[in-house]
Image (tube, rainbow, N blue to C red):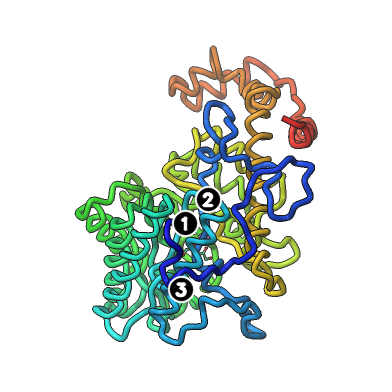
């Protein structure tokens, strides 16, 4: 940053220098051990493969409050009494953090960067002021916006839903917010725009006309799409699945449900999916399952990288440190041809008990290293191990003859019956799951 920070040169993370890559043997908690942004893997730098993004909400707006107690993390940017002054201080701190950490992207909800005003127009004005400051800071630092979104779940008016609220006038308020959040995203050259429907669902199916609500949600998304395109937004719109929490049931339950919804309503050429690890596990899947379902549909848009806690049923939004998760995720991402224009957004927060300013850095550093290691292992597994060819080989008899006739639609059910009768009992073959699992371990621990 050229001449200090916006609010007059205050440094919010004193004593923390730019985080650098050090040798994997380093014990410095404030250094990368695997993430070397310029390291080239398969013709692309780690920075371009991973496209890391810091989320504004957990990192700068959350203070560790839980249902049993208030926040424990005291941040200097929360000190100003005037909400706009606090928003400006928070934004300064955010850009200081982004540049010291060395990530290329960030993400926000409208209400993360600018407070809600007394009227629609006041809220729009607040967001416009903060958008101008963000644009200035982006220019100074080279930071880019991975995606913008509107918070359509915190305000009490949205308690029964936003686009799926039974009251049309609440839906109109949600539209006002999305319109203004799209304006901000376009002004900041945001590469994607996200819809996470936290309260789009129901608490009781008895008081809910689910069919009508789903129609409303589709209509709402198509109007947002039309407005976004009309103001020059060329990026992807993304829907982020989650099965529940805060609603008992969310309509965007998981990747397959959202894919079906988008296709049913003809939205699948503008909308893709933003897959969050902890949402996939809440839905009873693995992270890589939802990534793979999205990739199969050609709809893998972006990732909210985090993890849940295997002992807890809820969305704990922890930093991803499990190498199995990151290797499995990067296997899907690499076979998908990468993530761009999406990225890996850390929708994650440090624990309530982690109250040192450096803890926010340490959380991100660990997850960036875990994904860098996952990327290297996944790349080597794809390029150098037998994993892909062995998997393809399991399907070899669909490559020619009768199997290929079946794939090409040349056989009917009676033909299949006759083939079964003619060829007799097929030889059974091992699935060799353990062999595949061992390959993951072998390549995860290889030095590259
Ligand atoms: C909530 C969640 C959101 C979305 C953006 O579980 O993941 O923060 O990512 O609204
Ligand atoms: Co998320």
Which residue position is annotated with label 2?
103
Other-residue count near label 3 (Cα within 10 Å), few / some / many at <14 / 14–19 / ≥20? many
Quadrant in the picture for residue 223: bottom left
Instruction: Report helix, strand or loop for mark 1.
Output: strand
Give the mark nearest the N terminus, 3 or 2: 3
Tell whether circle 1 marks a residue whose Cβ is less than 8 angstroms from ligand 1. Answer: no
Give the mark nearest the N terminus, 3 or 1: 3
Q: How far apart are the alpha carbons under marks 2 and 1?
A: 8 Å
Instruction: Report helix, strand or loop for mark 2.
Output: loop
Please report the residue visible at 59 percent of the width from the left and 66 percent of the height from the top. 13
In percent of width and height, residue 255 lies at: 50, 51
178 sits left or right of 97 in the view: left
Please report the residue visible at 79 percent of the width from the left and 50 percent of the height from the top. 27
Q: How far apart are the alpha carbons under marks 3 and 1?
A: 17 Å
Which quarter of the rendered picture does the N terminus lie within?
bottom left
Tags 2 and 1 in contact by the CB under 8 Å rule?
A: yes
Residue 89 got which mark?
3
Eyeballing the image, is 323 above or below 80?
above
**Residue pushed farthest front?**
3
Which residue position is annotated with label 1?
106
């Amino acid at each position: 940053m050229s001449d200090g920070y916006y609010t007059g040169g205050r440094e919010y993370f004193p004593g923390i220098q730019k985080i650098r890559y050090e040798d994997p043997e380093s014990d410095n908690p404030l250094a990368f051990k695997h993430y070397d942004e310029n390291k080239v893997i398969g013709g692309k730098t780690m920075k371009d493969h991973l496209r890391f993004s810091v989320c504004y909400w957990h990192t700068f707006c959350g203070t560790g409050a839980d249902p049993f107690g208030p926040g424990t993390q005291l941040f200097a940017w929360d000190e100003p009494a005037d909400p706009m002054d606090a928003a400006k201080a928070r934004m300064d701190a955010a850009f200081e953090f982004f540049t010291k950490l060395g990530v290329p992207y960030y993400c926000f909800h409208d209400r993360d960067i600018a407070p809600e005003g007394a009227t629609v127009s006041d809220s729009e004005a607040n967001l416009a002021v903060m958008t101008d400051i963000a644009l200035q800071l982006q220019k100074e630092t080279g930071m880019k916006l991975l995606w913008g979104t509107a918070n359509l779940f915190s305000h009490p008016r949205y308690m029964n839903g936003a686009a799926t609220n039974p009251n049309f006038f609440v839906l109109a308020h949600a539209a006002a917010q999305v319109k203004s959040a799209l304006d901000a995203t376009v002004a900041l050259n945001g590469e994607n725009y996200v819809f996470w429907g936290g309260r789009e669902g129901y608490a009781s199916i008895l008081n809910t006309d689910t069919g009508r609500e789903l129609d409303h949600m589709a209509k709402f998304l198509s109007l947002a799409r039309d407005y976004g395109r009309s103001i020059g937004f060329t990026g992807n719109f993304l829907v982020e699945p989650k099965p529940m929490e805060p609603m008992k049931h969310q309509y965007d339950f998981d990747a397959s449900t959202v894919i079906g919804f988008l296709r049913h309503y003809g939205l699948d050429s503008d909308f893709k999916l933003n897959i969050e690890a902890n949402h996939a596990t809440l839905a009873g899947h693995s992270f890589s399952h939802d990534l793979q379902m999205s990739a199969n549909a050609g709809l893998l848009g972006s990732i909210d990288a985090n993890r849940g806690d295997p002992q807890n049923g809820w969305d704990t939004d922890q930093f991803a440190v499990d190498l199995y998760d990151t290797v499995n995720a990067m296997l899907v991402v690499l076979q998908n041809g990468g993530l761009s224009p999406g990225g890996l957004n850390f929708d994650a927060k440090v624990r309530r008990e982690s109250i040192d300013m450096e803890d926010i850095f340490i959380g991100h550093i660990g997850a960036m290293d875990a994904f860098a290691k996952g990327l290297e292992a996944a790349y080597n597994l794809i390029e150098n191990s037998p994993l892909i060819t062995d998997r393809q080989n399991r399907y070899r008899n669909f490559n020619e003859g009768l199997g290929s006739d079946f794939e090409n639609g040349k056989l009917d059910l009676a033909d299949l019956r006759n083939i079964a009768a003619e060829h007799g009992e097929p030889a059974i073959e091992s699935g060799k799951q353990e062999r595949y699992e061992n390959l993951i371990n072998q390549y995860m621990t290889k030095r590259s």
